Image: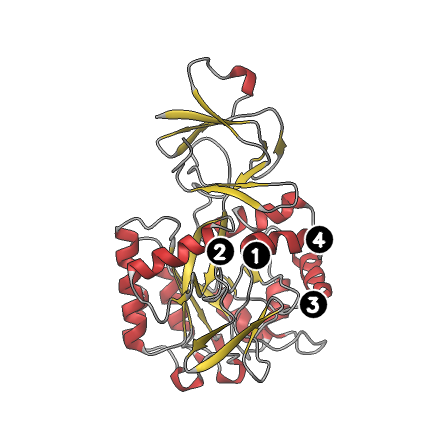
Amino acid sequence: MTFALTGARIFDGTNMLEGRAVVVQDGTILAVPHERDLGAGIKRRAVTGLLAPGFIDVQVNGGGGIMFNDVRSAEGLRLIAAAHRKYGTTGLLPTFITDTREKMAEAVEAMRGALASHVPGVLGIHVEGPFINPKRKGVHNAAFMRAMEEEDFDILSSLKEGRTLVTLAPECNSMEFIARLSAAGVLVCAGHTASDYDTVMEAIRHGLRGFTHLYNAMPPLAGREPGPVGAALNNRDTWCGIIVDGYHVSDAALRLAVAAKGTERMMLVTDAMAVTGTSMKTFDLHGRTIYRKDGKLSTEDGTLAGSDLDMATAVRNSVERLGLALPDVLRMASFVPAAFLRLDHELGRIAPGYRADFVLLDEGLHVQDTWIGGEGLL
């Protein structure tokens, strides 16, 4: 079936367009013509607001009341994705954090099932730990942390559909494993690391692709010890995830990072937990109670535990708090993560041949509607 969305201002991934329509056929964008050039017989749906590529979040620990670690099933992944869709996220990597090898294997198997059953929005899995440094553990459970072994590699390289992202500490794992994962198509990021600059740069030469929640769970940038932050900002070929919630990183530090690296490889992430899309005030994480208050998630001692953030709020914060231009921010929420995932040939733009994944925003950048593969447009 062929139909057209009309009436909205359109951000196509590069430019703001006025007076255009988006023609969709079988879940794929067919054309973005002037509305006046639409054929008289084509079915239309009029919408009001800003139509942009759907948001893509590569770090989502949970949502809809559950954590991926606790509900390792295709149905659990469906619930998490549905919770985030309300906030404009049309593509995501559910994130399995530090735990046992057995549960990690179960999480990968759950993702295999979700991809086979085409759960809307699910693009693959993010495995964050256990191959990280206990010195920078954050809220992760140090009891499960260890160096990668051959059995782990087999599990992490086994998902042939979708994308697999692994966050690890370069100093705690062999460069051989980083190179082998990269060669197998796995995306490797540095995170929860105490590494020095030279080790991170060596990891980049072996295939390290990016940095998980830049600044957080890593040493601060220093004049004689630039560390992971210095490596991230000094290398134009890597991507950085940033959490723009006012708690994880100061606005000033985020503006400095963007000034150093540009927006082209900075991607917004949420690091969201079970509370997204719910009124929950607490939840359990590895036997510890996590408290939700004033847009912040933390343990009783104040340790940050993921974020109480959604992608639409991250977009608003990036415009209002960081002062970034809206087109740049929308790219950071869509095309940049699509490029990181090597999916920028099909996601992150409103252009012919791309999947019809859209978010409709009002003037305040609040979500009015979302579509994945054109579903529900008529």
Tell me where residue 361 appears, x and y as whole percent. 58, 42
Q: Mark 3 sits on what residue?
A: 250
Tell me where residue 325 appears, x and y as whole percent. 69, 46
Q: Nearer the viewer, residue 340 or 348?
A: 348
Tell me the amino acid under the disc marked 2: Asp
Spatial separation of the CA atoms under disc 4 and disc 1:
14 Å
Tell me the amino acid under the disc marked 3: Ser
User: Is 97 left, or right, of 250 in this rendering?
Assistant: left
Spatial separation of the CA atoms under disc 3 and disc 2:
21 Å
Spatial separation of the CA atoms under disc 4 and disc 3:
14 Å
Residue 174 found in image quarter: bottom left
- Total marks shown come to 4
Tell me the amino acid under the disc marked 4: Glu
The label on residue 268 is 1
Q: Secondary structure at mark 1?
A: strand
For marks 2 and 4, the one nearer the N-term is 2
Q: Secondary structure at mark 3?
A: loop
Q: Nearer the viewer, mark 4 or mark 1?
A: 4
> For the point 55% across and 54% down, which residue is it?
311
Q: Mark 2 sits on what residue?
A: 57
For marks 3 and 1, the one nearer the N-term is 3
